[in-house]
Image (tube, rainbow, N blue to C red):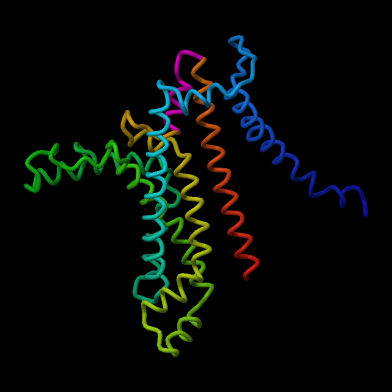
Amino acid sequence: MGFWERWRIPIMLAPTMAVIILLFIGGLTYGTLVSLGWQPIIGRTEISLQAYQNIIFSEQYASVFWQGLLLTIWVSFASTFLSAVLALATALLLRRSFFGKRLATFLYQLNLPVPHVVAAIGILFLFSQSGLISRAGAQIGIFGYPSDFPVLVRDKYGIGIILSFVWKEVPFVGVIVLAVLQSLGVDYEDLARSLGANRWQRFRYVILPLVMPGLLSGSILVFAFTFGSFEVPAILGVRFPRTLTVTAVRFFRNPDLNARTEGMAISIIISIIVFFLVLGYMWLSRRTIRQD
């Protein structure tokens, strides 16, 4: 075996791996050092966990961090749960044969390439108290004034953020579930039907267990993305409480460079949580492969 045949794959992967190592691992290493207080540009070279202690326990930052963490978990969980439920329901409908199925499937996937920031701006224009729906409702007499429209955008419960994420992520999870359903066919359901199982029993004991690995894998990816997303909460969120990503960027943009340590500490905490979610996704994927 010649030199090229032996080293062909490593050489071809080298540019990609170099970018990953430089940008991802390098950035993560730098962020970790800054979160530990290493900022030689302002004369700070001592390493400590003071920033983590400040954001978790200090009177100044603890409430900001913990309320931001609760809001982030709530938004991520609600977005993921609603996306998973709606994705499963729509996938079950789209796998059936009906007139216009191709058009419905095309429209269902149409928003997949739409950037999240565009989706957030669309939600803002539609559901804000000065948006299209509130103004149209006021014109036809549903509301007395546009300001009477319920606060769905920039609210403290993150409803607008959740709406944006659900609109974007339902097709993503739905495509995964639909692919699983189409690969399974109808043999299992026909067998269950022949044994006397009704529609609910076929769904509960046949369909759901078969699609659950794919549904869980997609849900973990959605949760990890929404947990670390910045642009949607920045556009649709309130000033307080903020999600962790928006809080981290706020620290990082502080004119006082010392505040970057706390901002990086929050970013590292987000990275650790997302890392474990990715590990969970990989574990589910491998388990699914072994079962197949």
Q: Position of residue 88 (x, y in %)?
A: 41, 64
Q: Which quadrant of the figure has residue 91?
A: bottom left
Query: Per the image, is 79 magenta?
Result: no
> Of all residues shown, which one is farthest toward the top?
43
User: Residue 117 at what x, y percent from top left?
Assistant: 40, 39
**Quadrant location, the N terminus:** bottom right
Q: Where does residue 203 sit, x and y in percent of width and height?
A: 41, 74
Q: Is residue 221 left or right of residue 128?
A: right
- Please tell me which residue lies in front, 77 or 47: 47
Q: Residue at x 46, y 85 (%)?
A: 190
Q: Is residue 123 left or right of residue 52?
A: left
Image point (13%, 46%), residue name: 137
Judged left or right of residue 127, residue 57 is: right
**Front-most of residues 236 and 37:** 37
Q: Which residues are magenta?
A: 245-257
Instruction: Name the magenta segment's main secondary structure.
Output: helix
Q: Nearer the viewer, residue 95 or 201?
A: 201
Is 103 located above or below residue 144 in the figure? below
**Quarter of the image with the C terminus in it:** bottom right
Which residue lies at the image location 46% right of the left edge and 26% below the top edge? 57
In the rendered image, the vertical position of residue 165 relative to residue 194, given as above or below: above
Answer whether residue 253 is magenta in the image.
yes
Farthest residue, direction right: 1
**Could you tell me residue 150's position as x and y percent?**
18, 43
Up-down relation of residue 240 to residue 128 (above or below): above
Q: Is residue 279 above or below residue 214?
A: above
**Snapshot quadrant of residue 24:** top right
